[in-house]
Amino acid sequence: MARKKKYKEEEVIEKAMQLFWRNGYETTSVRMLEDEMGINQFSMYASFGNKHGVFLESIKCYKGKVKTELLDKLNNAEGVDGIKQYFYDFIDFSKDNTLNKGCLLTNTVNELGEQADKLIWSEILKFATNVRGLFISKLKCDYSKDEKTIVKQANYLMVALQGLSVASKMFEKRQLDDFIEETFERL
């Protein structure tokens, strides 16, 4: 008879996600995961396969948090102002007390680059495609814009969001606010 788990997978993955978000994939060791998650290596491997499996589940957890805390709000917002608010909300979302963590997915792209495996890339691309689609739908609220302009602006906003993610780890709030204001002044 299999032993009953003494932990909730969602809770330990939330802890692992926070650890990966702070430290990155490569820096995070299995020992660090054991300590943070509060489970031993055997339990971790039994539930998630390996460190890579824990990371994939952490990415899914992160995407769920972003959906709940940011994307649902964007989805219900109106036009460009909704996208602008998303940028401001992202800054608040990416902070952890005094630590500015940026975006877990952007951090992963910056860290692993082309070395990231197909499953990780797939999760990141699905997320980016979803956000870009929401940007397009909000930009379409301005009926004076043609499809070509909307696509260009959505692409611009995606690149700006990635830059904001990286910049949020090192610049002060005032500087980030100025960046957001300048970004949206051009739309």
Image (tube, rainbow, N blue to C red):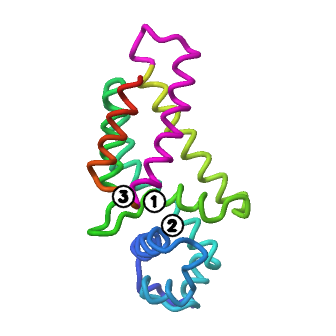
User: In this rendering, would 4 be left or right of 81?
Assistant: right
Q: Which secondary structure lies at badge 3?
A: loop
Pointer 1: what residue? Answer: 62
- What amino acid type should be assigned to the residue bearing mark 2? Ser
Decide: few, some or many residues near mark 2? Use Cα within 10 Å; few <14, some 14-19, many ≥20: many
Pointer 3: what residue? Answer: 94
User: In this rendering, would 70 be left or right of 53?
Assistant: left
Decide: few, some or many residues near mark 1? Use Cα within 10 Å; few <14, some 14-19, many ≥20: many
Q: CA distance from mark 3 to mark 1?
A: 11 Å
| Mark sitting on residue 78 | none
Q: Nearer the viewer, mark 3 or mark 2?
A: 3
Residue 166 lies, in percent from the top left, at 47, 55
Residue 167 lies, in percent from the top left, at 43, 53
Q: Is residue 163 magenta?
A: yes
Q: Which secondary structure lies at badge 2?
A: helix
User: In this rendering, would 85 be left or right of 167?
Assistant: left
Specify the quadrant of the image occupied by residue 186.
top left
Decide: few, some or many residues near mark 3? Use Cα within 10 Å; few <14, some 14-19, many ≥20: some
Q: Quadrant of the N terminus?
A: bottom right
Q: Which secondary structure lies at badge 1?
A: helix
Residue 90 lies, in percent from the top left, at 35, 49
- What amino acid type should be assigned to the residue bearing mark 1? Tyr
Please report the residue visible at 30 percent of the width from the left and 56 percent of the height from the top.
Answer: 172
Q: Earlier in the sequence, mark 3 or mark 1?
A: 1
Labels 2 and 1 touching (C-beta < 8 A): yes
Q: Is residue 8 magenta?
A: no
Pointer 2: what residue? Answer: 58
Please report the residue visible at 37 percent of the width from the left and 29 percent of the height from the top.
Answer: 184
